[in-house]
Every structure is written in C-alpha cells, then in structure tokens.
Image (cartoon, rainbow, N blue to C red):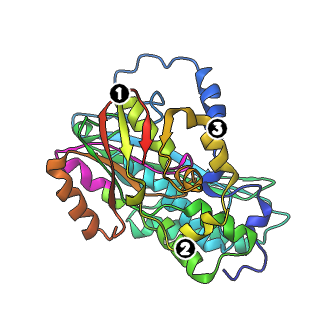
C-alpha cells in the first residue's frame, strides 16, 4: 500500500465490479449470432460458463479464457497479483490446469511511470510462476484508465470437464472463500479500510483456486463455477438455471472475510451490487428475518472469489477435506439444490 499515488483514483471502478451489469450483458449476448456447428467445441458462451473448452483429442481438451479489469487496490504489484489470480481461476473452475498465459495491458502512459506499470506486470507474472506456467507474450495499448489481466489457457481431460450446469437435486453447495471483497474494496476507495482489512482482501484475492483441478477426481462433484462480478447470487443462479433446479441458501452459513459484516451493516457497498440485484432480483426469494444489508452482501461483486461446488452428500466430506488440505479454511456448505422453478431462496 505504499504507492506514491492511488491507482484506484485513475479508474471509475475496480476489480470484477467493472463487469457490465447482468441486464446489459444479457441484452448484448442475445444479439450475438448463433455459433456454427463445430463438433469439437465442448463449451461455448451458451450458459455463461467460466471458459470455452475445445476437444483436441481423446485425452486432452483446451480451456481458453480471458479476464481483465481496473485496479481494486493501489499497490501496483498487488493489483497485478490479484488480476492474474482472478484470470487463472476460470481455468481451475472448469476442472483444468493452466499451461501458459498472455498478458493484456492497457495503461495511461501519460499518468503512470514505466516503473509502476512494470510492477503490475511483475505481480501477475509472479502468480503464474507460482503455479508453474509462463507469461508467453501479450498485447498492450495506451488507455485512459489502467487495465490489466490475462488470457489463460489450460488443459483438462474431455471426460472430466466441470461446468456451471449439471447439479442434481439433493446436491450440497460448497463455497470455498469468504465473501465481501467488493465491500472491502469500496472501503479502500473511501479511504476507511484499515491495514487488517486490506491484508484480508489481498490474502483472499491472491489465493489461487488450485482446488478446482482436484474436483473432477471426486465422482460426486457434478458442477462448479467461481464467484466473481455477479456476486454469490448471480453465479448461483447460473448454476440453478442451467441445471433446471432451485437452490436454498443458508445465510448464516455464508463465510465472510474479516471486518465485512460491520462495514456492510454501516452501508459500505459497491454500485455493482445494486446493478446486480436489478438484473436478477426477481429470481431470488429473501427471507423476512434476514438483516437489512443481506442483499448488498449477496450481490457483492467478488474479485477473484471462491469456487462454488455442487456435490452429492456422499462425497461432501471428500470435497471439504480436500479444501482444508489446499488451505481453503473458510470453505463451507452454504446451500442445497432441489427440484424447482429456477429460483434461489435465502433464509
């Protein structure tokens, strides 16, 4: 947090809160032409999944994804680390492992020193090095706001691809990281986030979702996605719609990052949380006993958030045990899928 100026002051939004509002994105995608018949295209954009998947042969499928955003923090190296972790998450959310990345860079070169831009890229490269892959190239432009992210490519066995569809009635929903990244980011931008809150946010957003690559080996794992800009509710709804089910969420079971409950109760929130609710709130049922701020937390955009794993009760212990082994100590069972009308109920 020792940047000589505030990176976040150069951008209108930060992290995954920069995503287009769900209603806007839905309208844009509705006008996209139908994809042609490609026999090896296993996953496209149809269900809003985390990445595209293309079968290469009987033993390998290519996972391809990209993610980039404006700064959510002011430290340039931390910004790079968070953006890279977030982009790689989409490969792990499909059950795969990354093989290399390309950098996407847009920077206001008249406002940012070359050394600062270099620190952003170095932060991203350090995350890739930690998981054993290179940043093999990329593309850069002069842009009015700082933007950084990755194209991430990975591999998975064609029979072991996990999608955000396929959950079954009776499956439990596991969330592997605490919620509240958007709230902490909003407090940072206000200048009211303390050192402990900052450390909690960076620790969560730079924890790589390597757990995802372990999930295809557990037979009872039926679906998986990660929680990013549309918040817990938005990404849970993607799972519900695609699986033709409903979901009951236990609000009290939701893991929160340190300090988040107090901040959101004080009214700290992002503009994206309101846009998220406007986009899908009619598909959600909120219990009357929930705190007044519950909606803001449920719709809070998560930059580099946790995984959502739909798993049968028989294999729940295997998922939770693996999460603990991988260092996801906040992982919790937060809901149950059931036959229904495509809605999410929270009580």
The N terminus, quarter of image: bottom right
Q: For marks 1 and 2, give the CA distance.
A: 36 Å
Q: For marks 3 and 2, give the CA distance.
A: 26 Å
Earlier in the chain: of badge 3 and badge 2, it is 2
Q: Position of residue 236 (x, y in %)?
A: 43, 42
Task: State the residue position of label 3.
Answer: 278
Q: Position of residue 82 (x, y in %)?
A: 55, 64
Q: Is residue 85 left or right of residue 224?
A: right
- Residue at screen point 40% across, 59% down: 252
Task: State the residue position of label 1.
Answer: 244
Q: Position of residue 165 (x, y in %)?
A: 35, 34
Q: Is residue 51 visible?
A: no
Task: State the residue position of label 2.
Answer: 259
Tell me the element at label 2.
Answer: loop
Q: What's the magenta region?
A: 212-231
**Label 2 neighbourhood size at 10 Å, few (<14), some (14-19), many (20+)?**
some
Q: Residue furthest left?
A: 314
- Residue at screen point 78% across, 72% down: 113
- Residue at screen point 42% across, 63% down: 255
Q: Position of residue 109 (x, y in %)?
A: 80, 62
Tell me the element at label 3.
Answer: helix
């Amino acid at each position: 947090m020792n940047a000589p100026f505030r990176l976040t002051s150069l951008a209108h939004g930060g992290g995954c809160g920069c995503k287009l509002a769900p209603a806007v994105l839905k309208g844009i995608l509705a006008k996209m032409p139908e994809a042609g018949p490609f026999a090896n295209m296993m996953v496209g954009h149809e269900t809003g999944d985390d990445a595209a998947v293309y079968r290469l042969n009987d033993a390998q499928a290519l996972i391809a994804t990209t993610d980039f955003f404006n700064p959510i923090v002011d430290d340039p190296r931390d910004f790079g680390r968070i953006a890279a972790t977030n982009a790689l998450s989409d490969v792990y959310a499909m059950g795969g492992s990354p093989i290399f990345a390309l950098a996407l860079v847009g920077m206001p070169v008249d406002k940012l020193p070359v050394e600062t831009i270099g620190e952003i890229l170095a932060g991203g490269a350090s995350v890739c090095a930690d998981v054993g892959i290179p940043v093999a190239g990329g593309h850069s432009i002069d842009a009015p706001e700082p933007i950084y992210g990755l194209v991430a490519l990975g591999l998975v066995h064609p029979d072991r691809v996990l999608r955000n569809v396929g959950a079954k009635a009776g499956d439990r929903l596991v969330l592997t990281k605490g919620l509240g990244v958007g709230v902490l980011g909003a407090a940072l931008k206000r200048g009211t986030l303390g050192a402990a809150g900052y450390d909690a946010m960076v620790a969560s957003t730079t924890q790589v979702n390597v757990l995802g690559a372990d999930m295809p080996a557990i037979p009872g794992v039926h679906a998986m996605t990660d929680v990013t800009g549309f918040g817990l509710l938005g990404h849970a709804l993607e799972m519900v719609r695609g699986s033709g089910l409903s979901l009951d969420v236990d609000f009290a079971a939701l893991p929160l990052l340190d300090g988040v409950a107090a901040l959101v109760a004080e009214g700290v929130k992002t503009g994206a949380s309101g846009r998220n609710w406007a986009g899908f709130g009619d598909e959600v049922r909120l219990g009357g006993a929930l705190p007044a701020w519950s909606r803001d937390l449920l719709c809070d955009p998560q930059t580099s958030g946790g995984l959502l794993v739909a798993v049968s009760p028989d294999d729940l212990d295997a998922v939770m045990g693996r999460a603990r082994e991988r260092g996801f100590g906040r992982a919790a069972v937060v809901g149950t899928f059931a036959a229904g009308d495509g809605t999410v109920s929270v009580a």
